[in-house]
Image: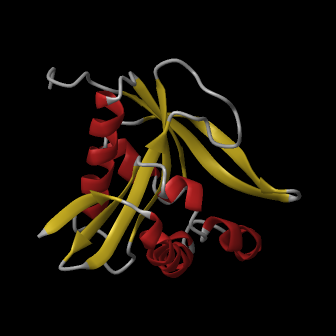
């Protein structure tokens, strides 16, 4: 049975391993090697402050980590805050568990938690690979963006958004 729990400091290494194993396999069909060789070393590392934020969650089955993801009120990249806005952060599914509902469980939990915290809409910087998933989860496309990962390293993504329903109105 798939369970979701809040990540802790003790989970940083497991999240790091999940990202490092799954991102290269999942992103390969949609990104050229020239992008992956520079972006993957940055994308495929757990962010300790995010993992321990209290709004980052793990999906597990029989003690095995199958997915992770969360949200923050802070706009990624140091962009401050916008009233009512939540931001999807670092969602990943184990590449061996894709199409088993892991991503849906994690993202549903993220949406519920952000709404419970009073957020009214949620923004996402999706990989090109994950756009169909986010669309299926009710996100609308804003447009293509380039995410600066480090000086001279940019990552093509898609900006997306979805309104959140207040708790109890579903």
Spot the residue most to the right: 152
Find residue 62 and report its horizontal and vertical position in percent.
18, 79
Find residue 2 and report its horizontal and vertical position in percent.
17, 67
Identify the residue at horizontal 88%, vertical 59% (top origin).
152
Identify the residue at horizontal 35%, vertical 29% (top origin).
117
Identify the residue at horizontal 32%, vertical 75% (top origin).
65
Placement of the N terminus among the 4 image quadrants: bottom left
Colouring mode (rainbow / by chain / secondary structure / one colour): secondary structure
Find residue 31 and report its horizontal and vertical position in percent.
63, 67
Spot the residue most to the left: 1
> Image height check: is 140 above or below 99?
above
| Residue 100 occupies quadrant | bottom left
> Image height check: is 158 above or below 90?
above
Find residue 156 and report its horizontal and vertical position in percent.
68, 53
> Would residue 149 be visible to someone looking at this image?
yes
Identify the residue at horizontal 39%, vertical 76% (top origin).
95
| Residue 111 occupies quadrant | top left
Q: Toward the viewer: 4 or 92? A: 4
> Image height check: is 5 above or below 93?
above
Placement of the C terminus among the 4 image quadrants: top left
Q: Is residue 20 found left or right of 138 in the rendered image?
A: right
> Would residue 138 be visible to someone looking at this image?
no
Q: Toward the viewer: 120 or 145? A: 120
> Image height check: is 165 above or below 139?
above
| Residue 68 occupies quadrant | bottom left
């Amino acid at each position: 049975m798939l369970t979701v729990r809040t990540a802790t400091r003790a989970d940083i290494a497991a999240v790091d391993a999940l990202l490092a194993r799954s991102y290269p396999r999942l992103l390969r069909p949609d990104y050229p090697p020239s992008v992956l060789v520079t972006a993957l070393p940055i994308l495929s590392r757990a962010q300790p402050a995010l993992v321990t934020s209290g709004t980052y969650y793990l999906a597990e089955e029989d003690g095995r980590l199958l997915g992770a993801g969360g949200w923050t009120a802070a706009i990624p990249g140091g962009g401050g805050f916008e009233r009512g806005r939540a931001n999807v952060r670092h969602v990943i599914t184990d590449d061996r568990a894709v199409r088993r509902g892991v991503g849906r469980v994690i993202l549903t939990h993220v949406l519920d938690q952000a709404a419970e915290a009073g957020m009214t809409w949620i923004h996402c910087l999706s990989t090109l690979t994950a756009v169909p998933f986010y669309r299926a989860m009710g996100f609308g496309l804003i447009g293509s963006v380039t995410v600066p990962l480090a000086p001279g390293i940019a990552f093509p993504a898609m900006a997306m958004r979805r309104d959140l329903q207040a708790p109890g109105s579903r």
